[in-house]
Image (cartoon, rainbow, N blue to C red):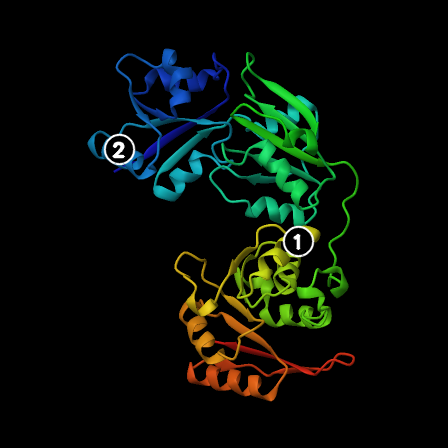
């Protein structure tokens, strides 16, 4: 059964232009598909008797109709999509849902290319981020990696004003905003240059996209945040994982190759913040039993420009872990004398090839960790013994599957 798609990219012009080859394909087509907006634009171009499959959620229903079409008659299915269908577009969805399909593409300019063209702004160095139906993760990553030129695809939740407020909240105030609304529609198209402050208080018509352009070179990321720069628990400067130990801990966790880190007993948030700042691809979930931890994480993560940490307050052993991303790296910063129970619970959710790291300051905690790891059938790695200034020596302990 042949599954042939012809995917045609288009913009928002009410009277679209298609090259002669595409016009002929449309005239000869029988079954068409696209969004409701696409149908409104191209309806006058469709041949008599044309059938249309709306692309709406849930997409499984749409693809079930595609499968039924190919099973019954097998004629090519012409799909209209926005811009370049391979640029976060519907052609990618077809490839994922129907990997055996034969796809022929006729792309148009995507919306960020169009915005750059209108501004006569080179975009070869642009970092592209889609927030359409996606979380903040990739924007946060681009900011922490100090990308000087970011192009953003938005949706009705991740609006330009919401994006501007997020940047301001975390100290990324060195960008100029360029917003394009209804790009490609001569009657509605609007392009604005704004400061982040102006954008944060403005309203925008959907669909829209924007670019963030740094006004001047961005400051480098710190490597090893000074301990005194953090806000501390009740002002107690000793209640923090010191910067050299923090960096050695991140090395033991092997975070460059990890996806999700859990930090249990985060206190000031120093390990979580340093981990996410140095490895912005990482998802970080942090647990702290003390209610003061929420304030400390909020203050310190904003102070150092580290958005996106999930901070949970309460007893880790009682926490509902069902909807959390499973970790492949876990740091235990505090265990309240219940290390064996904590290790057992971590072992239940830890992904294969994952690791657990504990910084031990006493013979008792070292023995408890080693015993607990042995009982769980995990492998103990050679410990690292560190003495730092006049502080108690620390053993950095690591266990793996």
User: Label 1 to label 2, Cα distance in Å?
Assistant: 51 Å
Residue 368 in view, yes or no: yes
Reading the image, the residue beneath label 2 is: 65
Q: Nearer the viewer, mark 1 or mark 2?
A: 1
> Is 280 positioned to the left or the right of 134 in the image?
right
Nearer to the camera, 10 or 224: 224
Is residue 401 at all visible to an observer of this figure? Answer: no
Pointer 1 residue? 299
The secondary structure type at the circle numbered 2 is helix
Q: For this rendering, which residue is in front, 400 or 231? A: 231
Across and down, in percent, residue 207 comes to 52, 26
- Identify the residue shown where x is 42% and y is 61%: 321
Q: Position of residue 49 (x, y in %)?
A: 26, 15
- In-image side of 72 versus 89 (left or right): left
Q: Is residue 240 above or below residue 292?
A: below
Label 2: few (<14), some or many (≥20) within 10 Å? Answer: some
Q: Where, quadrant-wise, is the N terminus in this rendering?
A: top left
Q: Is residue 44 above or below residue 268?
A: above
């Amino acid at each position: 059964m042949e599954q042939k798609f012809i995917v045609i990219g288009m913009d928002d012009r009410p009277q679209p232009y298609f090259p002669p080859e595409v016009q002929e394909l449309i005239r000869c087509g029988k079954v068409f598909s696209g969004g409701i907006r696409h149908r409104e634009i191209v309806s006058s171009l469709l041949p008599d008797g044309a059938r249309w499959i709306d692309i709406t959620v849930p997409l499984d229903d749409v693809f079930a109709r595609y499968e039924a079409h190919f099973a019954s008659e097998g004629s090519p299915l012409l799909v209209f999509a926005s811009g370049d269908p391979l640029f976060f577009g519907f052609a990618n969805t077809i490839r994922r849902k129907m990997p055996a399909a034969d796809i022929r593409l006729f792309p148009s300019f995507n919306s960020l290319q169009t915005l750059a063209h209108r501004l006569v702004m080179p975009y070869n160095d642009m970092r592209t981020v889609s927030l359409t139906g996606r979380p903040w993760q990739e924007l946060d990553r681009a900011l922490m990696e100090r990308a000087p030129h970011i192009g953003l695809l938005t949706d009705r939740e991740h609006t330009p004003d919401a994006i501007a407020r997020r940047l301001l909240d975390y100290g990324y105030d060195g960008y100029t905003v360029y917003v394009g609304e209804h790009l490609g529609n001569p009657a509605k198209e609007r392009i604005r240059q704004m400061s982040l402050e102006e954008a944060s208080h403005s309203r925008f018509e959907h669909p829209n996209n924007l670019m963030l352009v740094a006004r001047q070179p961005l400051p480098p990321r710190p490597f090893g945040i000074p301990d005194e720069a953090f806000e501390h628990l009740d002002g107690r400067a000793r209640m923090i994982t010191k910067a050299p130990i923090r960096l050695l801990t991140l090395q033991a966790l092997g975070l460059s190759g990890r996806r999700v880190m859990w930090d249990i007993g985060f206190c000031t948030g120093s390990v979580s913040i340093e981990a996410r700042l140095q490895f912005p691809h990482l998802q970080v979930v942090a647990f702290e039993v003390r209610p003061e931890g929420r304030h400390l994480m909020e203050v310190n993560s904003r102070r150092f420009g580290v958005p996106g940490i999930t901070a949970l307050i309460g007893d880790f052993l009682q926490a509902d872990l069902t909807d959390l991303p499973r970790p492949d790296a876990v740091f235990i910063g505090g265990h309240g004398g219940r290390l064996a129970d904590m290790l057992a619970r971590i072992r239940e959710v830890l992904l294969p090839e994952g690791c657990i790291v504990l910084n031990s300051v006493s013979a008792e905690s070292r023995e408890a960790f080693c015993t607990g790891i042995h009982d769980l059938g995990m492998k103990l790695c050679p410990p690292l013994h560190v003495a730092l200034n006049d502080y108690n020596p620390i053993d950095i302990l690591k266990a793996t599957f």
